[in-house]
Structures are given as structure tokens and as C-alpha cells.
Amino acid sequence: MAEEPPTTDLITLTRHVLHDQLRLGAAATGDLTLLLTAIQVTSKFIATNVRKARLINLVGLAGETNVQGEEQKKLDVLSNDIMVNALRASGKTAVLVSEELDDAIIIEERNRGKYCVVFDPLDGSSNIDAGVNIGTIFGIYKVRDGSKGTLEDVLRPGSEMVAAGYTMYGSSANLVLSTGSGVNGYTLDAALGEFILTHPDIKIPPRGKIYSFNEGNSMYFHPPVNAYLKSIKYPAAPKTPYSARYIGSMVADVHRTLLYGGIFGYPDDKKSKNGKLRLLYEAFPMAFLTEQAGGIATTGTKRILDIVPAGIHDRCPVFLGSKEDVQDLMKCYE
Ligand code: AHG
Ligand code: MN
Ligand code: MN
Ligand code: MN
């Protein structure tokens, strides 16, 4: 049987988002599409640097420590600079928050737009030097009516984000995005330089068979978490135990969870009162995507997207994934 010829009708990310905006009618100005174009360029730029890192002396430490006390890698700093420059130049942003910057950037008037972007420029930095999947995470708020862009515009619950997504730098670069009506995944065609729709309307299976926790921290975990882990590792027959998969890059662990189902967790524990993951630019965007894909994202006792951040670098416990798996976890907290 003859093979089908390749399609001549590619759905690029820009085409897809524009189509969505057109559907919204007069309310849409195209500004979000332009902002997303700027974000796509940063992802392509970061992806090429990730690929070349070993060859152009981009592995290893930058020599500085960030506000969370982590030693910055060269790629953390480079990715941050790429994003700040592109987002400022886009003319569509008012406030920027980055994991790698102590303070929020309030964009000067001549470049100012109406969106606020919170981002983790490079997620999974402990995996960089081993060539393991890493990524970029972002969330987007629109400034409140009448605001020119202040800290208050980003100290808002995640449910008020207008879009969120991530790009995973793996065997290919994958951008996964939600503008509030479902989740779509796009793969970078490096020859074209375009993100092409490859994963339309991602839905998390209602139950999975995989758990993704850093179990090396078990001795610090609180009883509900250990009780849950025990229940999936030693289930009563005829159930069989879950498989463990933990990469240590939130982007990669969440990506797998969205596609295959199961549960990802980074709990608070006896050592870290609020866990490790940062609310604004890690937990919120991933919770937004998870809910849009039909899953649940919780701290164990409350919905992540309802939390009101007090500071831009706040942390929170995170459990997300398949509806039934996360519900089982939540029962351990009752
Ligand atoms: P980042 O590299 O942006 O600082 O984020 C690291 C985070 C996240 O990617 C991952 O889920 C988690 O740290 C892994 O932490 P452990 O090494 O403690 O498991
Ligand atoms: Mn970090
Ligand atoms: Mn991160
Ligand atoms: Mn990071």
C-alpha cells in the first residue's frame, strides 16, 4: 500500500492561537498572540543553547547564588537574560517575575504592555550537565483594570492567569500551552523553525500507574504522604503496585504525567515547611495545565490555583495528575 504524502497544511502554534483569538471576536486584540510569539522565540533560542551547551562552554556554574540560595548554572543565567530581553522588547509586558531575579521587573513606560509574565527560565538545572530533559515554565496574567503594572498584578491566585505553559527541551523541543480552553502540545520542527501542533487537546487519563516523588526524602515526609506511598506500593490484591518514575525536572515529570497519567508530588516535609517548588512560576502554571487537562492539582488539603501569593518567591506543596490518583492522595490527608 502506498504511503500517504506529508501534509501540506501545517497547524503552527501561532496559527492555532490566532484562530482561537479570532473565535473570541472583538475582545481579542492579538496582543496575547504577539506575546506568545515572543515566548516561542525565547524557547527556540534556549533550545539551541541547550543543544550546544557542552560544545560552547555553557555547562557548569555561573558563580552566583539566586534569591533562593541555589547556585546558578550558566544556562540558568543565560536563559533568564534571553527571556527578560525578549519579553521587554515585545512591548506586551508590564511586570516580569523570574526565579533567577530577587525582585520583579516593572517595565518602563515606552515598552509597556498589559501582560505580566512569571517564569522559571530553566527548570531542572541539576540535570543540565547530564544532558537530561530540562525546560522553561511560564504563566501569564493580564494587568488589573486601570493598573499600569505593579507587584499586585502578579500577587494573585493562579486561577486568574490567562495562559500558562512550558517548553521541554528533550529529544525534541515540546511547547505545551493552555490559554484557558484546554491544553495543546506543539513540537518544534527545527528545519522550519516553527512549533507544530502534534498533541491536540491533551487530557490526563483519569487514573494512571505511575508515581513520581523524590522518595529519598521519605524520612522527612509527613504521615499522609508515607501512607499514600505505601498504599500504591503494597496494594491489596488484585491490585498491582505502581511504577516509580522521577526525573527531577518538574517539566519532564509533569509532561509525562499529562500524557500517561499517574501522580507527581513534591510535598512539604519536616525539613521544608512549604515544600520546594515555587508557587508563581512552577506550581501555578503546572496546576493550570493540569486542571485544563482534566486532572487535579492540590497541596494535599487545598486547590493550588486558589492560593493567594504573599511574595513572588513563595513556595507550596504540590500534588498533581490523574483525578482518581490525586483523590486517593487527598483521602490520606482527611
Ligand atoms: P529549578 O532547576 O528551576 O531550580 O527547579 C528544580 C525543581 C524542579 O525541577 C524539580 O521538580 C525539583 O526541583 C527536584 O528537586 P529534588 O532534586 O529535590 O528532587
Ligand atoms: Mn533553581
Ligand atoms: Mn524549576
Ligand atoms: Mn529554574
Image (cartoon, grey):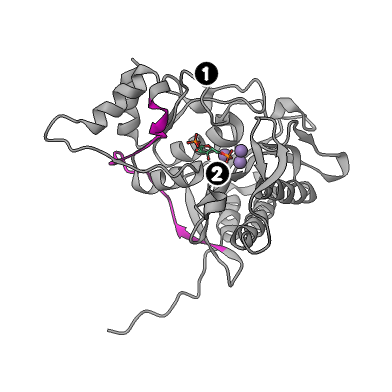
Asked if the magenta segment contains residue 207, the reply would be yes
* Residue at point 60%, 55% (across, down): 18
Alpha carbon of mark 1 to alpha carbon of mark 2: how far?
Answer: 22 Å
Q: Which mark is residue 126?
A: 2
Name the residue at the top extreme.
334
Q: Callout 1: few (<14), some (14-19), or many (20+) C-alpha neighbours within 10 Å?
A: few
Q: Is residue 175 visible?
A: no
* Residue topped by disc 1: 273
Ligand 1 near label 2 (Cβ, under 8 Å)? yes
Q: Quadrant of residue 111?
A: top right
Spot occupied by residue 159 in the image (x, y as percentages of width and height): 55, 30
Q: Is residue 136 above or below residue 284?
A: below
Q: Nearer the viewer, residue 308 or 44?
A: 44
Camera-side residue of 143 and 205: 205
Q: Is residue 118 above or below residue 231?
A: below
Type of amino acid at the residue the image marks with label 1: Lys
Examine the structure image and report whether residue 175 is included in the region drawn in magenta: no
Position of 125 compared to 270: left or right?
right
Q: Quadrant of ligand 3?
A: top right
Q: Position of residue 181 (x, y in %)?
A: 49, 43
Please name whichever residue, 271 or 273, is drawn nearer the observer in this view of the structure.
Answer: 271
- Asked if disc 1 and disc 2 are in contact, CB closer than 8 Å, the reply is no
